[in-house]
Amino acid sequence: MPERELYEEDYFTKTAYPGGYRDFSQHDARFGALMYLAKPKSLLDVGCAYGYMVGRALARGIHAVGMDISVWCEKQANVTLPEGHFIRRDVEQGIPFNDKEFDCLYCEGVLEHIAEDKIDFVLSEMARVANKRVLAISFEGDARGHLCMHNAEWWKQRIPSKTWLYMGNCSSDVDPFNWYYKGRK
């Protein structure tokens, strides 16, 4: 199976999420951290899956759009989100929005799935489309589909300025002590 086809129905219903992907309690904690750290006026969620973070932002009156590579996620997001708040796109191909179109970009559990030779391009695209970023990277080892696994120091060197980086276990609640912020250059 080609690597990019990995993130379809089986991934979200069996292999990565044996009980099925759903609106986990961790989403509340992560959304709270996003609101506290970035105070977004508008939000792009890259790798949004079914769009739960986008839905939370919309419920607060924040303009939000989700983006994911998965056809399966697109089908699910079309049920959970209003029309026009989800686009299907491979982030390795670029982010199809204007420069600084969003106040904030949120991306959780995605960067470790990007080919290492594309990481710098993807991070530059994230910096291009949003004023600030909140990124969460899993350091859980050789999970299925993880292509770019490095320690926190490696990631700290690459992330753009005005970015918060969560460095912990993405399958648990957000630990408030595992955040790193890279300020302006």
Image: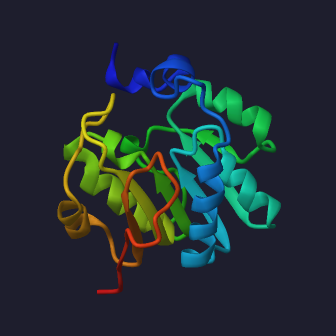
Which of 86/25 is in front?
Answer: 25
Query: How far from the left and from the top, in percent, is residue 18?
Result: 52, 23
Query: How far from the left and from the top, in percent, is residue 167?
Result: 34, 61
Residue 165 placement: quadrant: bottom left
Query: How far from the left and from the top, in percent, is residue 13?
Result: 57, 21
Quadrant (top left, top right, bottom left, bottom right) of the N terminus: top left
Q: Residue at x 60, y 77 (%)?
A: 36
Q: Residue at x 66, y 57 (%)?
A: 28
In the rendered image, the vertical position of residue 49 relative to residue 158, given as above or below: above
Colour scheme shown: rainbow
User: Is residue 170 toward the left or the right of residue 53 in the image?
Assistant: left
Quadrant (top left, top right, bottom left, bottom right) of the C terminus: bottom left
Q: Which residue is drawn at 25% across and 68% down?
A: 156
Q: How many labels does the image show?
A: 0
User: Is residue 18 toward the left or the right of residue 142 in the image?
Assistant: right
Residue 120 placement: quadrant: bottom left
Q: Residue at x 29, y 54 (%)?
A: 121
User: Is residue 126 toward the left or the right of residue 146 in the image?
Assistant: right
In the rendered image, the vertical position of residue 4 relative to residue 2, given as above or below: below
In the rendered image, the vertical position of residue 111 relative to residue 90, given as above or below: below
Q: Is residue 102 visible?
A: no
